[in-house]
Image (cartoon, rainbow, N blue to C red):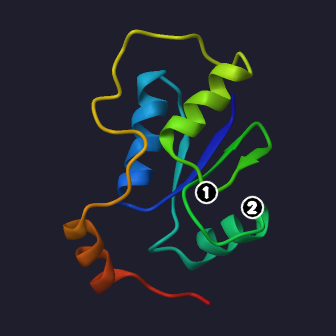
Amino acid sequence: MNIKAYLKPSCGWSNGVRAVLAKHGLAYEDVDIINNRESYAEMVRKSGQPLSPCVEIDGVMLADVSGEEVENYLLSNDLVKPTDRQAGIPTNAGCSDDEHAKMATKTVRFF
């Protein structure tokens, strides 16, 4: 399976996606959309929208998704099997107020 995850370095939603992929032992490319202008533009072009996380799995783009939604896609399409392993963090939660405050000082606007 070829997985390319367009993620923020520190974000509740992005960390939920990472946790789900790790829970299922899936290798993936973690693409930083905050510190790399070209990666962000690629995500927008491929997904047709500016929100993240976006996860491309074997050419299928899941746009603006949570880890829970990624896991549901993987299970629904028999790409992974159910497991008793836990993700270890919430897979369907946004950033805390503290995380938002940190990002507000570092976020680069590309458009």
Judge from the rendering whether residue 46 lies leftward or rightward of residue 31; answer left or right: right
- Indicate whether 25 appears above or below 94: above
In the current view of this chain or complex, which residue is farthest to the left?
98
Q: Quadrant of residue 3?
A: top right
- Indicate whether 92 appears above or below 48: above
Q: How many marks?
A: 2
- The local secondary structure at tag 2 comes to helix
* First in sequence: mark 1 vs mark 2: 2
Report which residue position mark 2 lands on. Answer: 47
Residue at mark 1 to residue at mark 2: CA–CA distance: 9 Å
Amino acid under disc 1: Asp
Where in the figure is residue 54, as x and y percent of width and height? 61, 54
Residue 20 is labelled as none
Q: Quadrant of residue 96?
A: bottom left
- The local secondary structure at tag 1 comes to loop
* x 59%, y 67%: residue: 51
Q: Residues within 10 Å of mark 2 (few under 14, many from 20)?
A: some
- Indicate whether 99 appears above or below 22: below
Where in the figure is residue 32, as x and y percent of width and height? 48, 63
Q: For the C terminus, which image quadrant?
A: bottom right
Q: Quadrant of residue 41?
A: bottom right
Amino acid under disc 2: Ser
Residue 64 is labelled as 1
Where in the figure is residue 89, as x and y percent of width and height? 29, 36
Are the two marked residues, 1 and 2, in contact with CB atoms closer than 8 angstroms?
A: yes
Q: Nearest the camera: 62 or 32?
A: 62
* x 32%, y 60%: residue: 95
Q: For the N terminus, which image quadrant?
A: top right
Q: Residues within 10 Å of mark 1 (few under 14, many from 20)?
A: some
Select label 1 or label 2 by which is in front.
1
* x 47%, y 22%: residue: 25
